Image (spheres, grey):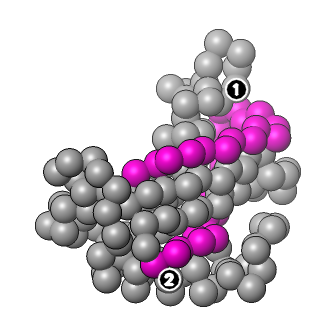
Amino acid sequence: MFSLPNPFTCQWQITEEMIDHYGHVNNVAYVKQIETTAWLHSNSLGLTIGQYQALDRGMAIRTHHLEYHHPLHLNDHVICATWITLCDGKASLHRRFEMVNTATGHCVFSAQTQFICIALSTGKIKRMPGEFIEAYSTAYRLVKDHV
C-alpha cells in the first residue's frame, strides 16, 4: 500500500468544510492534514508541544514538495502515512508523507518536507536537543535502508 516500510499512520475522513468550489478537497486541507499527521507521529515518539516549548526548540518547515495524484471527495476515508527519511542529528529532519484512499487503494497525495531545528524564542537555527535526536533517529532507523 505504501512505498516505504514501517509507516506511522492515522485516519482522515473528508468533511464538508474541506470541500472547495470544484467539489473536491481544497489544497489547504492536505497541508493541514500533513501537519496533523506529523504532530501525531511526533507525539507517538514521545515529543509534545510542551516539551518543544520547555526546550525552546521546534522543527520549522524549510521546504515542502507536494504532489496531488487523485482528488478526494466528501466522506472519503484516507490513511495518512509518514516516515522520517533523514535525521542528521544536527539541525535537519526530513519527512515523507503518503495518503491512500481506502475505497480505491490509490495514493491520492504525497509530499516531502524538510524541517530545520530552531530556537522558538528567536527563530534562529539551532542544534537539535538530545530528546529530538533520540526520538527522531529511532524512527529514521526504521526506514533508512529503504530510502
In the picture, the quarter occupied by the N terminus is bottom right
Residue 67 sits in which quadrant? top right
Q: Which residue is drawn at 40% across and 51% down?
A: 60
- Residue 37 is left or right of residue 69, and the answer is left
Residue 71 sits in which quadrant? top right
Amino acid at pointer 1 = His
- Percent across and percent down for residue 54 are 14, 67
- Residue 110 vs 136, above or below: the answer is above
Question: SS of the residue at dot 2?
Answer: helix
Q: Which residue lies furthest to the top in this view?
A: 21
Question: SS of the residue at dot 1?
Answer: loop
Q: Residue at x 34, y 56 (%)?
A: 125
Q: Residue at x 73, y 79 (%)?
A: 5
- Percent across and percent down for residue 134 are 40, 85
Front in this rendered view, residue 129 or 71: 129
- Residue 4 vs 126, above or below: the answer is below
Amino acid at pointer 2 = Ser
Front in this rendered view, residue 121 or 141: 121
Residue 101 appears in the figure: no
- Looking at the image, do the residues carrying marks 2 and 1 touch, with CB atoms under 8 Å apart? no
Residue 4 appears in the figure: yes
Residue 102 sits in which quadrant? bottom right
Highlighted magenta segment, given as a residue range: 60-89
- Which numbered marker is on residue 137? 2
Front in this rendered view, residue 114 or 122: 122
Q: Name the residue under label 1.
A: 24
Q: How many labels does the image show?
A: 2
Q: Which residue is drawn at 58% across and 80% down?
A: 140
Q: Please tell me whether mark 2 or mark 1 is closer to you in this view.
A: 2
